[in-house]
């Protein structure tokens, strides 16, 4: 027997999805994967076109180098599209494979779970983009994260970016992963929950590390101050 995979239906009714995955064969999943991937690429492209995270290019335009600025914006857009694909592929394939190895869940089932995760991450980015577009400016912090609060009390850039990665969506992702995985693994619930939390903490640490690495200084051959 077969059942049709419907993203919004099973996002809010995961028990039915879990039961269906245990007893029947799923179809139309690949179409949803490509659809979400397309929406993700479009979202990242719109953010770049609007000007999110392109502040460094403003000085080029202000100094009158319009042709250079146009080329830089095109290169920036291409880079963002590549990053969008890598970002979604990592959270979809990479984390699914990691969960498969840790919990022994079937890779196909882990992929279903991670499709929801990728969608939630994109929803968070879309919400931030929508609000920043309304107010007319942007910051490097997510409005759903602890980053703005950390920036109020901390001076350490690493920890500010670390807390910026930890958002309300992060908590929701852990809850969904925990609910889904415990139905397909014999691992204790306590151990499973700890593993899921550790994964998010490690991702937050890596993300914070990338934010403070002086890539521009390295590429220019200078030394960081």
Image: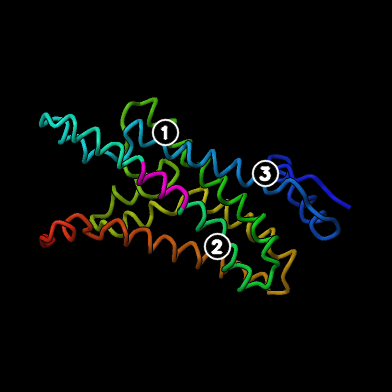
Q: CA distance from mark 1 to mark 2?
A: 26 Å
- Nearer to us: label 3 or label 1: 3
**Residue 143: x %, y % from top left:** 41, 40
Label 2 belongs to which residue?
A: 95
For residue 72, above or below residue 146: above
Residue 79 badge = none
Q: Report the residue at 25% width, 60% height from top.
A: 213
The answer to whether 84 appears left or right of 75 in the picture is right
Q: Residues within 10 Å of mark 3 (few under 14, many from 20)?
A: few
Q: Report the residue at 67% width, 69% height from top.
A: 189
- Contact, mark 2 vs mark 3 (Cβ under 8 Å): no
Q: Secondary structure at mark 3?
A: helix
**Residue 51: x %, y % from top left:** 31, 33
Label 1 belongs to which residue?
A: 46
Label 3 belongs to which residue?
A: 31
Magenta span: chief secondary structure: helix
Q: Secondary structure at mark 1?
A: helix
- Nearer to us: label 1 or label 2: 1
Q: Quadrant of residue 93?
A: bottom right
The answer to whether 93 appears left or right of 61 in the picture is right
Q: Quadrant of residue 209?
A: bottom left
For residue 178, above or below residue 139: below
The answer to whether 130 appears left or right of 139 in the picture is right
82 part of magenta stretch: yes
For residue 103, above or below residue 63: below
Between 88 and 141, the one nearer to me in the picture: 88
Q: Report the residue at 62% width, 47% height from top.
A: 33
Mark 1 vs 2, N-terminal side: 1
For residue 124, above or below residue 83: above
Mark 2 vs 3, N-terminal side: 3
């Amino acid at each position: 027997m077969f059942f049709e995979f419907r993203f919004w239906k099973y996002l809010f009714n995961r028990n039915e999805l879990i039961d269906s995955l245990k007893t029947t064969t799923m179809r139309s999943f690949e179409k949803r994967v490509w659809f979400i991937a397309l929406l993700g690429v479009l979202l990242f492209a719109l953010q770049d076109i609007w000007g999110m995270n392109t502040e460094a290019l403003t000085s080029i335009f202000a100094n009158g180098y319009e042709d250079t600025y146009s080329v830089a914006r095109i290169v920036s857009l291409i880079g963002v599209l590549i990053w969008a694909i890598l970002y979604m592929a990592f959270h979809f394939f990479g984390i699914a494979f990691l969960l498969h190895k840790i919990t022994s869940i079937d890779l196909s089932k882990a992929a279903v779970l991670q499709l929801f995760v990728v969608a939630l991450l994109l929803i968070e980015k879309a919400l931030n983009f929508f609000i920043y577009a309304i107010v007319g400016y942007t910051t490097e912090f997510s409005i759903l994260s602890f980053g703005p609060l950390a920036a109020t009390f901390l001076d350490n850039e690493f920890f500010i970016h670390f807390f910026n990665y930890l958002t309300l969506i992060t908590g929701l992702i852990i809850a969904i992963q925990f609910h889904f995985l415990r139905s397909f693994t014999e691992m204790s619930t306590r151990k499973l929950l700890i593993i899921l939390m550790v994964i998010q903490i490690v991702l937050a640490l890596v993300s914070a590390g990338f934010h403070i690495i002086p890539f521009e200084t390295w590429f220019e051959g200078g030394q960081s101050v």
